Structures are given as structure tokens and as C-alpha cells.
Image (spheres, rainbow, N blue to C red):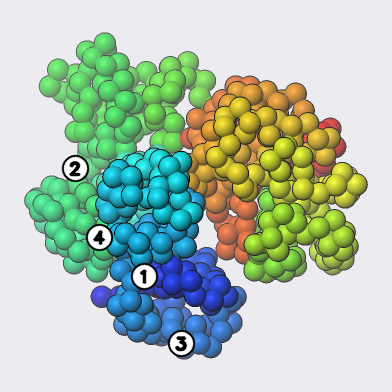
Amino acid sequence: MPVHNKDIIRVLETVADLLDIQNENQFRTRAYRQAAQTINSLPESVTEMIDKDEDLTRLSGIGEDLAGKIKTIAQTGSLPLLKELQEQIPPSLKDLLRIPGLGPRGVKVIYDELGVTDMQGLKKAAEQDFLRDLKGFGEKTQKTILEEIKKNNAHEDRMLFRDAQDISRTLLDYMKKLEGVKKVEAAGSLRRKKETVGDLDILLSCKKGTDAMGHLLDFEDVEKVVVQGKTKTSVVLRSGLQVDLRVVAHASYGSALLYFTGSKAHSIKLRKRGVKRELKINEYGVYKDKKKVAGKTEHQVYKKIGLSFIPPELREDRGEIEAAEKDSLPDLVRRRDIKGDLHVHTKKTDGYQSIEEMAKEAEKLGYEYLAITEHSKRVTVAGGLDAEELEKHIQDIEKVNRRMDNIEILTGAEVDILEDGSLDLPDEILSRLDVVIGSVHYKFNLSRKKQTRRIVTAMENPYFMILGHPTGRKINQREPMDLDLDDIFSAAKDNGCFLELNAFYDRLDLTDIACIQAAKKKVGVVINTDAHRTPHMHYMGFGVAQARRGWLEAADVLNTRSLKQLRKCLKGR
């Protein structure tokens, strides 16, 4: 069985988690996490790199020792150190680290004092009031842990869009290699580009006699066959993702793609619309009495019921059918509309590459501008900068800028919003920056009123420009802050601020619904990657997909503007 990058990442992260629980040296633990992050950013397979005898030590943060361990994982699927740690500590303990605020020390206390080894045991201990008497816990912490376990259970069956997309591409490429296959596409929530995916629907049309089902069963990542038939086969992959492959007639491909793309609410509304026109719509086609009148393409189906084509991202029954009837669907923003990225980090704080390396990557992406936005001093874990350090960094940016021909590097900072709403750097230094992003990085659990007031107060600072990752959520990991978004939108509009749509695949913050609200309230959105290394800059596509789900047009997005227009918008602030 081949070892993929995700398998290597999983081993490295598990080692780091178990070392953390053992209260091992922080630098050692961090080295494994950084190696996992580096591999997570690679566009290529580590196994293939090793087969080509490439030097892994050229990768950021990977020395000879770690390179050797990674090679062992790639060749065997495991690591002796991991087996050693798993003999000392139950590996299921690492799952408890998903509970916000618990941390390695808390997990160790629960394990040592109560013998809890997994999430079910933690839930039982909390329900029986065993946690509140432990050192460092208390009744409030116990209650919070129970709430977080409930949230965690609600997310555990859904995979991040990025991960599902990677699996889908590999599988589709594999299925396309089968002789006789005419068309094969992913449908379902993946095609609608939802931020998480429950399972993967694959639609395929092929020549008669093509053994598509047998070909799927030979796919190297298939772990379990759920059901096998002539037109539908379901399997579970090693990643835990279920794949449903359906073989459909070429003449019905459009109808089937529309039906299995969904959403359910969108499909029901289309069928009801068809009934009013005495048409029956199903996965096989559009029928007038018993005669098939459309079905080969999705465009045909929509046209037959009097609608313009609706992009998959909009098919959620949020008014898209009514808009299509009036031919007034939004001209959705596209990846090529983006002129620059206004939120990236370098190795000056917690990034991994230089100003010049990030700028050259932005050039390759065809950008006009790139803002370098390092953390401010409060984020000590990221090596945040104080005013004096930022001053020197501005000078470094300007030096690199003079060497660049085709892109403008903008000076910036991601400044912490403190608990009282003040900013973590003085106005004097903020006034010198091209871009100021204000973000919340701590105290996520303030009351709705206090958290909202905190952010509104920050927006009132004359140098505040962009609210970074506005709700602070991390998909499947951390719930959004409790905020009055209406008040946030109003404050942004009143103060001429913009809201970030953070494109990092585990944030996608703003949500699609929040993007719709922002556009209605005429609040500008900025799609940024929050890149910490050059491969992260390619995550812009995830942000654009989220913006499209949120009905945003290019005019709604600040960084679709030219450099001249951008400067004007920011100066207006």
C-alpha cells in the first residue's frame, strides 16, 4: 500500500501530540509539527521525491534526523518512535487535544488521575462530575468540556473541502485512465464547494462493457466495499471517506449531475417548478408525459424549465432560482479577478520564507501587489514584532521592493486586538503602514456583548483597515466567537473598514452566509490567504470558492482592484 503525504503528516502530528502529553522538550515537539506543516504545503509526493533520491533537508525546517525519520515513514508507513510512544501512552489520548483549552497538561492530568484514555471516557468523567475536582479544572471548565465534546461529535464525520478535493482529484485521474470512460466528475457538496464534505459522489458515463466498478475496486486506497452493483458501487477509502460511484447513460448525464450535485432543497424546488409546467424531472432526464425532452446537459434542464444556468456554488435554495428566472444571477468573482494578497507572513515572525521569496511567488501568480503583514508583539509564540522591530522590518520590505520590477510590496501588520479593543501597536507606527489588519488571537470566549464591543472599538481606530479572520473559527476545531455580526457589519461600514475572507482551508472565515450579509450591507470583503509559506498563497482559490458561495461579485472584493484603486480605497479609510 503506497504511503501518501497525508499518512506521513498523520504520523508526525501524532508523535508531536504524544510528546506534548508527555511534557517533552517544546523545541523537539515543535520540530515534528513544523515538519508536518512543511509536508502539508508540498505540491509533490514525498514518496516520489525519495524515489528520485531528492534531498529532503532542502525543505524548510527539516534537518538530517527528521529527513531520515520521514524516509522511514514513507517506506514503512510507520516510525519506531511512534510505536515506542504508543506503548507508553494510549494513542487515543491525542484525540482529547481537539477540545479547546484542554491542552497537553490537562490531558495528562485527566489520564493520570482518572485513567481517561479517549473521548467517550472524557465525556463520562465530565457527566459524573469527576473533572471539576481536578487541579486546574473546576465546574466551569467541566461544563465547557462537555459543550466542546458535543460540538466535536457534530463535526467528526465531515472532511475539510481541501482534503476531499485532493482525494477526488486522485480518484478522478485514476478513473479517467480506464479505456471506455467518456465522462467522470465529482458531484455533491464537493462540486458545490462546501467547506466540509460528508462523502464523495462520482458520476461516470462509459462505453458498453466497460468495467468501471471493477476498476474502482482496484483503486489502491479502497479499504472496504460497502455495496457493489452494476450501476452503483460504494466503498470506504483509507481516509474514512465514503465514495459512491454511479454509472449513468450519456444521454442522462446532465440530469444525473444536476440531481446528485444538489442541494436537496434546490432539487426539490426545481422539481416543483417542473410540475407546474407539466414536466417530470429526475436523475434520468426531463419528461413531458413519457417523452424525454432534456437531460444530456445541465444547461438543457435549466433552459427547459425557464431558468438560466445556475453555478453549482449557488444551489442552496437561497434565492438563486428566483434570480435565474429573472436572469439576474450575480456575475460571481473568479480567481483571475484577484490582483493581490493583503495578508501573508514571512520568517520575520512565524512564516517560513523571506520577503523576496513570497514576493516572487506573488509575481508568478500574476499579482500587482502583495502586503507583508507580520504579527504584533502580543503573539509571542509567533515572534510578534514591537514598534521598533516593525520599523526595521518596514525598511527591509522597502529594500526588497526596490529590487522587484513587476510587483509592489506593501508594508503591513496583523495587529492583535486586545481585550479592551485597543490595538497592540501604537498609532505612530501604524500610520506608516500601507495595510493594517486587526485580528483576535486570544480570549475567544468573551460574552457576545463584550466580544462585539471589543471589535467595534478596534474598528474605530483611524488606522484600522481590515478585520482579519472575523469570527476566529477553525473548521472542525474551534467554534466561531459569539458575535453580533450585524453590529460588526454596521461598524465596518461606518468606519470604512473591510472584512477579511480568510482563504486558509481550515478557516474560510467569513462563512458563505456572512458574505451574503456583507454584500447586502455594502461592506467590502478582502480575500486573503494568511500564507506562511509560498505554497499557501495558492489557497486563494479556496477563498474565491467561498466568496462565490456567498454571492460575491468582483466589485464586492477589495483586492480585485488595481494597485492605484486599492491605495485610494485604503487611503479613504
On screen, residue 412 above or below 262: below
In which quarter of the view is residue 311 placed?
top left
What is the C-alpha distance between the residues marked 1 and 2?
Answer: 37 Å
What residue does disc 1 label?
7
Q: Tell me the amino acid under the disc marked 1.
A: Asp
Q: Are marks 1 and 4 in contact (CB under 8 Å)?
A: no
Of tags 4 and 2, the one toward the viewer is: 4
**Tag in front: 4 or 3:** 3
**Nearer the viewer's eye, disc 1 or disc 2?**
1
| Dot placed on the residue nearer the N-terminal end, 1 or 3 | 1
Q: Callout 3, which amino acid? A: Gly
Residue type highlighted by circle 4:
Leu
| Badge 1 or badge 4: first in the primary sequence | 1
Q: Position of residue 486 (x, y in %)?
A: 60, 23
Tell me the distance, in whole angstroms, between the alpha carbons under discs 1 and 3: 16 Å
Three-letter amino acid code at disc 2?
A: Ala
Q: Earlier in the sequence, mark 4 or mark 3?
A: 3
Label 2 belongs to which residue? Answer: 249
Image-quadrant location for residue 257: top left
Residue 404: image location, x then y, percent = 81, 64
- Check disc 2 and report its element: helix, strand or loop: loop
Name the residue tied to disc 4: 237
Quarter in which the N terminus is drawn: bottom left
Residue position marked by numbered label 3 in the rendering? 68
Q: Is residue 440 left or right of residue 305?
A: right
Contact (Cβ within 8 Å) of mark 4 with mark 2: no
Marks 1/4: CA–CA distance: 13 Å
Place of residue 505 in the rendered image (x, y in percent of width and height, measured from the top left): 50, 51
From mark 4 to mark 3, how far is it between C-alphas?
Answer: 28 Å
The Cα–Cα distance between marks 2 and 3, rounded to whole angstroms, is 50 Å
